[in-house]
Image (cartoon, coloured by chain):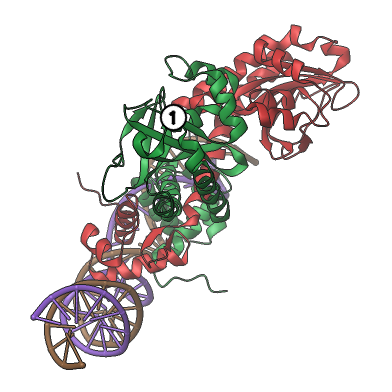
Chain colours: A red, B green, C brown, D purple
Amino acid sequence: MDNSSGVGVLDKTAAVLGALETGPASLAQLVQVTGLARPTAHRIAVALERHRLLARDGQGRFILGPRIAELATAAGEDRMLAVAQPVLIALRDLTGESAQLYRRQADSRICVAAAERATGLRDTVPVGTALPMTAGSAAQVLLAWEEPERLHRGLRGARFSAASLAQVRRRGWAASVAEREAGVASVSAPVRGQGGKVIAAVSVSGPIERLGRSPGRLHANAVVTAGDRISAALRRAS
Amino acid sequence: MDNSSGVGVLDKTAAVLGALETGPASLAQLVQVTGLARPTAHRIAVALERHRLLARDGQGRFILGPRIAELATAAGEDRMLAVAQPVLIALRDLTGESAQLYRRQADSRICVAAAERATGLRDTVPVGTALPMTAGSAAQVLLAWEEPERLHRGLRGARFSAASLAQVRRRGWAASVAEREAGVASVSAPVRGQGGKVIAAVSVSGPIERLGRSPGRLHANAVVTAGDRISAALRRAS
DNA sequence: GATTTGCGTCTCGCATTCCGAGACGGCAAT
DNA sequence: ATTGCCGTCTCGGAATGCGAGACGCAAATC
């Protein structure tokens, strides 16, 4: 099958990147593997280096550059948000509460996606908000499945205990009442990546007036199901 | 600063990739963000799509493509090997035994790098070899810091116990004698990635005749130091 | 130590490639 | 029904990129 895209420089570029997928290569090796003329391979490799898509190792050989990882991180983030957004909207509509997705970032959790209840009394967490790992049901979920040392380190200053995290693992979800903020209750469940690691937490949150002092009783099923659907969709997308 | 690389098509390509780093974009948005003429932006985007560096989302917008993740995975693997190889060589020379680096892959551990003792009685594990997770000091290290559920699942069929994994966590290294193979002893220590997660195990292995029935006594310090050096170098490289 | 070979890098004349104005069809907005 | 904007395509022309050849350097060979 013809591998030509109609833009010759990009066809040559793809060949160069492909050649470096197997490991570092000298210019001579690039020439051999890609079949390009030496000045051509040199010019394209140096131009890619200039844009940080390639770099050189300690022996002057070409390697894939740091920009590749930057773009891959951006691409991964996009994929998760694309998958999660319709699930959050469905969760909001099903439960009648605002829904969010949180990821851990050092000692904080970041709201990376949200579907807000449109009217009336509601909990608003704007996308981008950083919240602490010491309070809230999402913090419990992001911490509960860590290896024991990191779990215990994470409990310092937390408003929940190791015992409640054990309960989270057993039930598969966490609930909180007036932990992060007075008058707000929430329920969270894990989103798991490849290999089952917890990579995010999906939540609904709202006023205690509506959710009561046992918010899990109302909404745990819906939240766990939402987490399962996001997890399954991410596995399918890989 | 002039961002020109000397290959105009690659300059335009870098602009397109950069525009998509923030999220999906229609052709019109690409034109706006990059300043390219519409047919130019279209031709380059479609050519990148052809090489899987871009793709389209459900609404026809351009997004970063699957090839980005493939190249990033290859680049990450390269970096770890580049960092580990001199450390394995130094470990081999210091201990006089063969040294290896293992990564976990489902129910196996793969030897991804090795520095072999050149002469005499020696343990040879060729790069690429898949070994079981049920025996050997590297298996203990790759399992010891898992979250409890995955740790217990991993103990099924293993020739070591939860108690010995607790000892591994306490000491920071594992030793095995005649576990994977009669006559072979080994010592392993963790390699940790960003955030401290165990991502690989560094090992020395050799005959029981030389290493004795307490191989950790001889070589644990050197192996733990090697693991720390690889971990530190990976953190610096990011 | 001298010579040869192969490397990475650079130049520049030329031909091909890429550019972008304009056209087209489709669809959403008015 | 009309208008405006979108994505896609064509094609003449000019600018870009190509690659043969040259150069300097270092490693390999004799």
Residue A238: image quadrant is top left
For the view shown, which residue lies furthest in the right direction?
A182
Residue B146 appears at what percent x and percent y? Answer: 56, 26
Answer with left or right where residue D7 lies relative to residue A81.
left
Question: Closer to the camera, A170 or A156?
Answer: A156
Question: Which structural element holds mark 1?
Answer: strand
Residue B168 appears at what percent x and percent y? Answer: 56, 30
Identify the amino acid type marked 1: Ser
10 Å crowding of disc 1: few (<14), some (14-19), many (20+) = many
Residue located 71% across and 12% down the image: A167
Question: Closer to the camera, C18 or A164?
Answer: A164
Residue B139 appears at what percent x and percent y? Answer: 44, 29
B62 up-or-down from A225: above or below: below
Residue located 49% across and 56% down the image: A66
State whether residue A101 appears in this view.
no
B96 up-or-down from C26: above or below: below
Answer with left or right where residue A182 lies relative to residue A202.
right
Residue B60 appears at what percent x and percent y? Answer: 47, 38
Residue located beneath label 1 in the image: B176
